[in-house]
Image (spheres, rainbow, N blue to C red):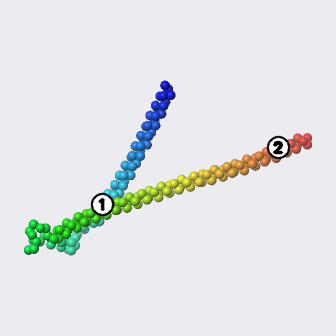
């Protein structure tokens, strides 16, 4: 009965521990995901701001708008949008697609850079741990060597002392 209760208590403790570890893992994963999303958002914002028109547009950039606002030409139907507007609309779709593609490539590049940085820091940490472990092993080996030398010296002194005592006892 008591053994069964101990078994149930141990099982419960293990379950609580596993749950704690799992929650911690999920929290870390969510934090990494949130960080990646934030990095991507910052980068996307920067790319979009880079491609936005500047506050003082040049006269050349106003020309297509002026042409698009003109009345239809005799060869153009009244309900058909002017050619310049069609080109701008087509270009905006192409620009949006290329902008999305560029954003995805940029986000992928940023993620790869971040993962590389994390991997390099992990490798550096592991190297540091290995180095510390090797130093500890060398120190331990040196301590063992010093101890064996000391023990050998103490044994020889003890043996010499025993010989001298035996010689003194034989002489007396």
Q: Residue furthest right?
A: 171
- Where disc 2 sits, the SS reads helix
Numbered label attached to residue 45: 1
Q: Please state if 125 lies on the left or on the right of 61 as rendered.
A: right
Q: Residue at x 10, y 71 (%)?
A: 76
Q: Which residue is mark 2?
A: 162
Q: Nearer the viewer, residue 22 or 163?
A: 22
Q: Please state if 98 lies on the left or on the right of 21 as rendered.
A: left
Q: Residue at x 49, y 30 (%)?
A: 6
Q: Nearer the viewer, residue 144 or 59?
A: 144
Q: Residue at x 86, y 42 (%)?
A: 166
- Where disc 1 sits, the SS reads helix
Question: In the figure, residue 163 lies in which quadrant?
Answer: top right
Q: Is residue 4 visible?
A: yes
Q: Residue at x 43, y 37 (%)?
A: 16
Q: Nearer the viewer, residue 79 or 149?
A: 79
Q: Is residue 49 visible?
A: no
Q: CA distance from mark 1 to mark 2?
A: 88 Å
Q: Earlier in the sequence, mark 1 or mark 2?
A: 1
Q: Position of residue 94 (x, y in %)?
A: 25, 66
Question: In the figure, residue 109 lies in which quadrant?
Answer: bottom left
Q: Position of residue 48 (x, y in %)?
A: 28, 63
């Amino acid at each position: 009965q008591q053994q069964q209760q101990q078994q149930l208590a141990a099982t419960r403790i293990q379950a609580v521990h596993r749950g704690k570890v799992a929650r911690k893992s999920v929290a870390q994963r969510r934090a990494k995901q949130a960080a990646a999303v934030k990095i991507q958002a910052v980068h996307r914002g920067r790319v979009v701001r880079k491609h936005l028109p500047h506050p003082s547009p040049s006269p050349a950039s106003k020309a297509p708008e002026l042409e698009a606002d003109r009345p239809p030409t005799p060869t153009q139907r009244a309900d058909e949008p002017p050619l310049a507007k069609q080109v701008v609309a087509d270009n905006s779709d192409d620009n949006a697609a290329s902008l999305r593609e560029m954003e995805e490539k940029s986000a992928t590049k940023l993620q790869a850079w971040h993962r590389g940085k994390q991997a390099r820091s992990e490798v550096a940490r592991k190297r540091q741990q290995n180095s510390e472990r090797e130093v500890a092993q060398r120190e331990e080996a040196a301590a063992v060597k010093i101890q064996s030398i000391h023990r050998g010296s103490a044994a020889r002194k003890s043996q010499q002392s025993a010989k001298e005592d035996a010689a003194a006892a034989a002489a007396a």
